[in-house]
Image (cartoon, rainbow, N blue to C red):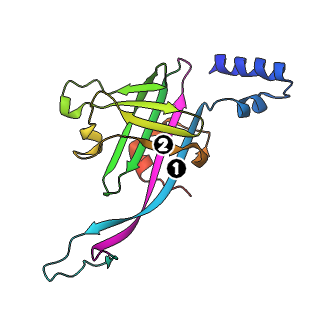
Amino acid sequence: MTKIRLALLSAACLAGMTSLAQAQEASQFEGGKICYKYQTEITQRRNSLGECMQGATVNERGQCVTNTIFYNNFAFILNDDDSMDFGFSYWFPSGANCGVTGIAVKTEDGWHYSNKTENESERCEIDITMDGETIKLESSDGARCAAQCGVGGVVTNIQYPMEYIRSKTVYPGDLLVSNLIETGCE
């Protein structure tokens, strides 16, 4: 981080900024936590009498559903070597969760994570890109991430809007999937 801070201080002096804090504010993040929530209907089975289970209601299509709120979290730390420590928890509309944590190496277009397993069904490779407005996660090379995301969960076009950044301070414990799953946005 020292090289980054020195570069920021130099940029601050050149731009006439009065403090390193102002330079950091104007620069890329060294880390961040993004969280957004959404509400969706999860379809529930009917009991043996054909009634909705407790807590479920009938929607306009006649299905038993529960209204569920999900919190999707992504946390990251950018390192001196340009790698990214990251963790995310993403809830699919089906109610399945995908959670991955690891270190992604810098690429030309962003970062690349690979869990380096030889078991093809558990192979997880994710490309992470940032465009200033969104952090986007995409499986690469047909990786399924089944161990982290379940059989049907595929990391395809998962997006975390930067407008939902909750904090620019991230600690290593913030990257743990268990913490990300249990954390709301408030």
Residue at the disc numbered 2: 74
* Most foreground residue, 181 or 113: 113
Q: Secondary structure at mark 2?
A: strand
Residue at the disc numbered 1: 35
Which residue is found at the position 77% from the left and 20% from the top?
Answer: 11
Question: Residue 7's spot in the image, x, y percent?
Answer: 71, 17
* Most foreground residue, 108 or 100: 108
- Horizontal arrangement in the rendering, residue 57 relative to residue 186 (left or right): left
Q: Residues within 10 Å of mark 1 (few under 14, many from 20)?
A: many
Q: Secondary structure at mark 1?
A: strand
Which residue is found at the position 30% from the left and 57% from the top?
Answer: 94
Question: Residue 158's spot in the image, x, y percent?
Answer: 42, 43
* Most foreground residue, 159 or 11: 159
Q: How many angstroms separate mark 1 from mark 2 (CA)? A: 7 Å
The amino acid type, in three-letter code, at marker 1 is Cys
As displayed, is residue 66 above or below residue 77? below
Q: Residues within 10 Å of mark 2 (few under 14, many from 20)?
A: many
Which residue is found at the position 32% from the left and 65% from the top?
Answer: 42
As displayed, is residue 92 above or below residue 77? below
Task: Reply yes or no: does residue 172 show up in magenta.
Answer: no
Mark positioned earlier in the residue sequence (1 or 2): 1
Which residue is found at the position 54% from the left and 37% from the top?
Answer: 171
Residues rendered magenta in the picture = 61-81
As displayed, is residue 100 above or below residue 123? below
As displayed, is residue 110 above or below residue 138? above
Asked whether the beta carbons under mark 1 and mark 2 sit within 8 Å of each other, the answer is yes
